[in-house]
């Protein structure tokens, strides 16, 4: 009988040691999925594809026509706190033009610069932003968000 108890005790010890060595699988974000919707803080139309990964990363693809120059990324934590970082580069192709000071200071655009390529000078710039807030998973399966500025948005599950 002593032998049986010794073997049983050894078996329990081995089982406990074995289970401690096995790592638990990573938790999947409850927000994971593919969505469509606006980007908080930009106000551009709906992105065709917003993906929340199982690790909480947020990727934006298929921008609307007016949001084509944006480069966006983000993340959402398990409690729903999100951060989205965006960057837009305006190449100076005439989107913002008639910038003063021009070669000639005047309010008459015809007098600002000579004709040709230098006429109506444009400005090149890069705009970046960070949007933060919270997201909750609604009973409808969509993500409902509120930015820290108080603006709300909905990402509709695909």
Image (spheres, rainbow, N blue to C red):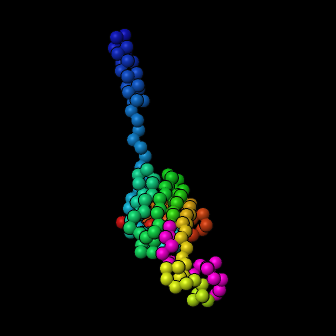
Going 39% across and 33% down the picture, which residue do you hit?
22
- Residue 105, picture quadrant: bottom right
The quadrant of the image that shows the C terminus is bottom left
Percent x, y for residue 65?
Answer: 41, 75
- Residue 67 magenta: no
Relative vertical location of residue 38 with respect to residue 100 in this rendering, above or below: above
Going 37% across and 18% down the picture, which residue do you hit?
10
Percent x, y for residue 142?
Answer: 43, 65
Relative vertical location of residue 115 with respect to residue 71 in this rendering, above or below: below
Percent x, y for residue 1?
Answer: 34, 11
Magenta-colored segment: predominant secondary structure: loop
Residue stretch rendered in magenta on the structure: 89-107
- Of the pair 145 and 59, the residue shown nearer to us: 59
- Residue 26, picture quadrant: top left
- Residue 106 magenta: yes
Going 49% across and 70% down the picture, which residue do you hit?
91
Q: Is residue 65 visible?
A: yes
């Amino acid at each position: 009988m002593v032998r049986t108890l010794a073997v049983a005790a050894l078996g329990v010890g081995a089982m406990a040691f074995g289970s401690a060595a096995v790592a638990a699988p990573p938790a999947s974000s409850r927000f994971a999925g593919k969505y469509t919707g606006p980007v908080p803080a930009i106000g551009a139309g709906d992105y065709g594809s917003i993906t929340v990964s199982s690790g909480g990363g947020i990727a934006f693809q298929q921008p609307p026509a007016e949001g084509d120059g944006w480069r966006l990324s983000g993340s959402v934590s398990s409690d729903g706190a999100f951060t989205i970082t965006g960057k837009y580069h305006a190449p100076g192709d005439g989107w913002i033009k008639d910038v003063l000071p021009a070669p000639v200071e005047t309010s008459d655009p015809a007098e600002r610069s000579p004709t040709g390529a230098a006429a109506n000078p444009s400005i090149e710039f890069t705009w970046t932003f960070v949007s933060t807030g919270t997201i909750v998973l609604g009973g409808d399966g969509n993500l409902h968000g509120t930015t820290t500025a108080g603006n709300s948005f909905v990402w509709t599950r695909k």
